[in-house]
Amino acid sequence: MSRTLRDGELVLLTDRKGRRYLVTLAEGREFHTHAGLVAHDELIGGTEGMLVRTSRNAELTIWRPTLHDYVLKMPRGAQVVYPKDSAAILMLADVFPGARVLESGVGSGALSISLLRAGATVLGYEIREDFAQQAVENVTGFLGSEVTQRFQVEIRDCYQGIDDKGLDRVVLDLPEPWQVVPHAAASLHPGGILAAYTPSIVQAAQLREACEAGPWAAASTVEILHRGWHIKGDAVRPEHRMVGHTGFVTAVRRLAD
């Protein structure tokens, strides 16, 4: 990647209060905020970490957005899988470069980006066409159009079945993931992993119960809590606010026939 910021590139602007703004650079355009404006031409050709001043002398820092930044600020139609949960899914599902992954419940594409960035080839099932379109836009907006060679979204209901066979992973963000258990069993190769994200522990329990009939083993369910710390001189304490419950991640492995 070029170190120099380019026309058409997505950047993140942050102010002294920690507010963050995603901006696509374009020659001749301006970024407007309550603290004044900045011409894009002042940013194009610059470097990450550069400080710029608005027309009202407010200070902004420019960065290339991280995946974490992008997921929290990108356009969304459906609620996204938050970064802390995406990270858990990548680990529990053991997503690896070249893995063939079926993702159902694509939503706004946050988890799709994580799967693709880990090197997987992703086939998405999504029942809403508007969500599917938003997901593709978000994925290509962060990873570039070339990623579509490894990313395809079909408008279809995973509860009705999975056509692809020999999958490495099946990843679900659906209200009733237990309905997919028999389809996943028929589509995953032995040793493959089914992972599901569910807001309710009741959903996770019903999924685990559906897997008890086989051919599954090594089931686990986790909840990820994210608490930051305030560190300033001798003042060291947990932050007053934390990212608490968002959902549960359940993973289970397919046994051999």
Image (cartoon, helix red, strand yellow):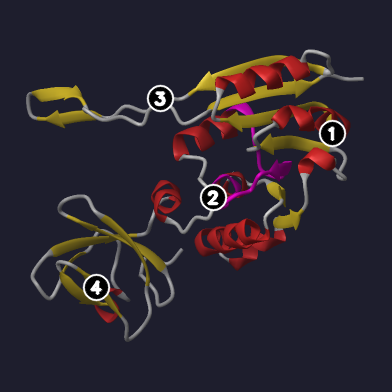
- As helix, strand or loop, the secondary structure at mark 4 comes to strand
Q: Amino acid at mark 3?
A: Leu
- Identify residue type, mark 1: His
Query: Which residue was labeled with disc 3?
Result: 225
* In-image side of 190 versus 62 (left or right): right
Estimate the spatial distance between the alpha carbons at disc 2 and disc 1, rounded to whole Å: 25 Å
Query: How far separated are the C-alphas under marks 2 and 3?
Result: 22 Å
Percent coordinates x, y for residue 128 in the rendering: 67, 55
Give percent across and percent down for residue 113. Answer: 56, 50
What is the span of residues highlighted in magenta in the rendered image? 92-112
* Above-or-below relation of 226 to 209: below
First in residue order: circle 4 vs circle 1: 4
Q: Which mark is residue 32?
A: 4
* Residue 201 or residue 224, whichever sits in front: 201
Of callouts 3 and 1, the N-terminal one: 1
- Given contact means CB atoms under 8 Å apart, are the residues at marks 4 and 1 in contact? no
Q: Residues at badges 4 and 3 in contact (C-beta under 8 Å)?
A: no
The numbered mark at residue 78 is: 2
Disc 4 to disc 3, C-alpha distance: 35 Å
| Residue at the image point whose x is 38% and y is 56% from the top | 65
Image coordinates of residue 160 in percent, x first then y, are: 84, 41
Magenta span contains residue 225: no
Where is residue 137 shown, x and y percent of the image? Answer: 57, 64
Question: At label 4, which amino acid type do we have?
Answer: His
- Counting residues from the start of the chain, the first of labels 2 and 3 encountered is 2
The residue indicated by pointer 1 is 183
